[in-house]
Image: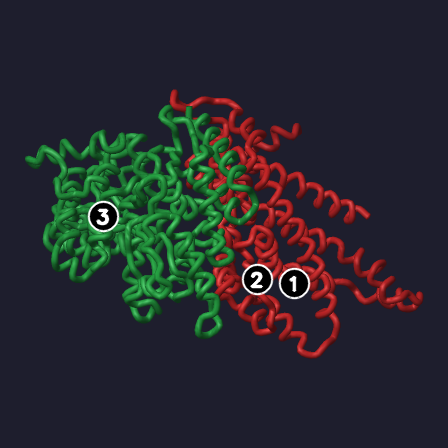
Amino acid sequence: MPKSRRFFSAQNRRELLLPAVFIAPALAVLLSLSIYPLIYSITISLQTETAAGVVWGVQNFARLFSDNFFWTAMAHTFVYAIAALTCEFLLGLGLALLLNAQIRGRGLFRASLLVPMMLPTVVVGVVWRLMLNPNFGAINGTLKRFGINTENLTWTASPKLAMLSVIAVDVWQWTPFVFLVLLAGLQAIPQEPYEAALIDGSSRWQTFWHVTLPLLKPSILIVLLLRTMDLLRVFDQIFILTEGGPGFATETISLYIYRTAFRFFDFGYAAAMSFVLLALTNVISAIYIKFLQAKEAN
Amino acid sequence: MRLTRLRAISLTLVLLLGLTSCIRNSQSNRKQLTLAVATGVEGEALKQAARDYEAQHNVHIEIAQFPYANLFEKELIDLKSQTGAYDLIMMDDPWFPKYASGQFLTELTPLLQRRGQTGPDSDFVEASLAVCRHPYQTGPLFALPYVGNSQLFFYRKDLFEKHSLKAPDTWADVLVAAKTIQEKESTGANGSRIHGYVMRAAQGNAAVADFMPIFWAYGGEMFDANGTPAVNSPQGIAALEFMVQLGKYSPPGYASFNADEVNAHLLQGTAAMSINWPAWLSAYRDASRSKVIGKMEITTLPSAEKRGQAEIGNWLIAIPRFSKNAEDAMDFLLWATSAEQMKRSAERGNPPTRRSLFTDPELVARYSTYPAQLRSLETSRPRPRTPYWNEIENAFGIFLSKANSGDLSPAEAMNQANAEIEKILQRAK
């Protein structure tokens, strides 16, 4: 019997109906909340409002090239993402290795490390904003006690320190997440390869490099992928901490998109920028996923 | 079994439907208005007024309250999508050109005429009414002014007397005083210092609001007679050079200060002068917040090449064009902005927009700063009236902030700002 005929047989139709009914609500939600807005944002990214009315075309995308603010915000986003990702990964890996070992109070350490991650980002932003306040904040207050001159340590207010401050806050909040995923990865590694390495007489460093790291690679790639996607669209902490300032020093692409859409009401241009960000995120994710699959194929 | 369950469900549904229609019926003869207000002292006063109005009239007033930044978003989304969700909207006056030029607001004069009035009450301060008209000052009326904010100049009378300084009539006087105070008060009683001046130069609204009075006093104008951006004129650059110079006597990090930081310094007595807004006045009378009770003097803005002018920052109330209850909304609007009701708003801490209230003996006895506030408001001027003000203020503010943080020289900052403002206007064409 040809495949198509069998597909439409009465029995098959009945069998297909039930799954279809079950999937329908999810599909409806997906269509109305994801697919429709996506198509709508594509259409508005191709529209420009002028005095003469709405004009269709790629003006919004062309405008990106001459917009200094856009490129600066993009550069800030990458500086932020790369710096934060590096610190979070190294610290997270270190902590995971440390707390994977049998040390006393391990449970307490693990639990307390997770606190920052459980706080809403907005709360983290507000708390750090207060702590980083140059005149009344806890950080400069503590430094002053040690006799350090804090007059020029204005943190979020200084064009030189502002980026460093917002990165530090992100590292503080999200290192625990990296730690948690890597710890789970470490604990899933079986004991046998370690025993084999021990018998072969490999040093601790060799064991780490040739046993732990390769076996941890899937976890590493997943956590890096998740963090990268999060970092590229960072918004809340920076919005609370500096609102993109001083000047433009910490304005990332998400902040600039937000400003364009909800302060200047230029939804078309904001949508165009969002698509560029989406494309970039996709390219970077694809690279990670390729690495991940290459690993699995091995 | 199955049938009885079905019956039970349908019975419940019918009952529920009946109940909701009953509720609707009981409310149908009561008029309803929806009001969008800001959080903070301005919005609270209007909210209270709405509650009073409800008690006196057969009207239910629904209140949608939002923080400053969200209010603008919510209102503009409603206005653009023509939903008519709000019957009355409260707005900061720089938003007005965007709303009015988009033809989103109801013209008020016909509504006034239907009530036997030819125009708005002549008791309103001219400068406050001017920002309710589109085009500015000359056009038809689209709003009424509710809160009469305009910038004021705050300075420490006690320190000025101590160091026999001349009152800050000009910006040159301000600089001399800032320098003297900073040098002579470098170590206070507990090793703390008093900064000569404090300003807010965070990008956006803050930096621009603190710069405009200096810019205007130096003879700068954002646009020339043809409407071309001209912030990089010699006067404009000189004004920014002055701002940066004055910034040397401002606490470190002022390039990211907003109103909160400025007032924290003034209230703690760690800074001697600033441009400030009336909404903060009550804090200076509050012993739990202020260490400078009775020491702060309030006056109009200093002059330079030109007479000092404050930036106006009035809160206006308008009726969206797509409101379905414009007549009822107008009744409320006239009631809320009447002298009697505005006096109650003044008692709740908002400066009025009526001359008779600024000179009302009871209010003056309570708020000794009213004469200075009236002088400031009457001579105030608005931010440049353009529907693209948000974009322009954002770009201009970034460069002002960069000049103050030392990233750019004043001339470079002004040149780059001018180029960005030009771009914004080009796109609008």
Amino acid type assigned to the residue bearing label 1 in the image:
Leu
Report the Cα–Cα distance between label 3 and label 1: 63 Å
Q: Which residue is mark 3?
A: B375
The correct choice, above or below, for B224 with respect to B289 in the image is above
The chain that hosts pointer 2 is: A
Q: Residue furthest top?
A: A52
Q: Which residue is mark 1?
A: A180
Circles 3 and 2 in contact, beta carbons < 8 Å: no
The chain that hosts pointer 3 is: B
- Who's the residue at 51% across and 57% down the image? B252
Q: Residue furthest left?
A: B116
Where in the figure is residue B378, as x and y percent of width and height? 22, 44
Circles 2 and 1 in contact, beta carbons < 8 Å: yes
Considering the image in quadrants, where does the C terminus of chain B appear?
top left
| Label 3: which secondary element | helix
Q: Which residue is mark 2?
A: A117
Which lettered chain is shown in red? Answer: A
- Who's the residue at 29% across and 59% down the image? B297
Q: Is residue A89 left or right of residue B374?
A: right
> What is chain B's hue in the picture?
green
Q: Is residue A126 left or right of residue A180?
A: left
Report the Cα–Cα distance between label 2 and label 1: 10 Å
B13 or B194, which lies in front? B194
Q: Is residue B301 left or right of residue B355?
A: right
Q: Mark 3 or 2, which is nearer the eye?
A: 3
Where in the figure is residue A4, as x and y percent of width and height? 62, 29
Q: Mark 3 or 1, which is nearer the eye?
A: 3
| Label 1: which secondary element | helix
The correct choice, above or below, for B101 with respect to B271 in the image is above
| Residue A285 in sight in this render | yes
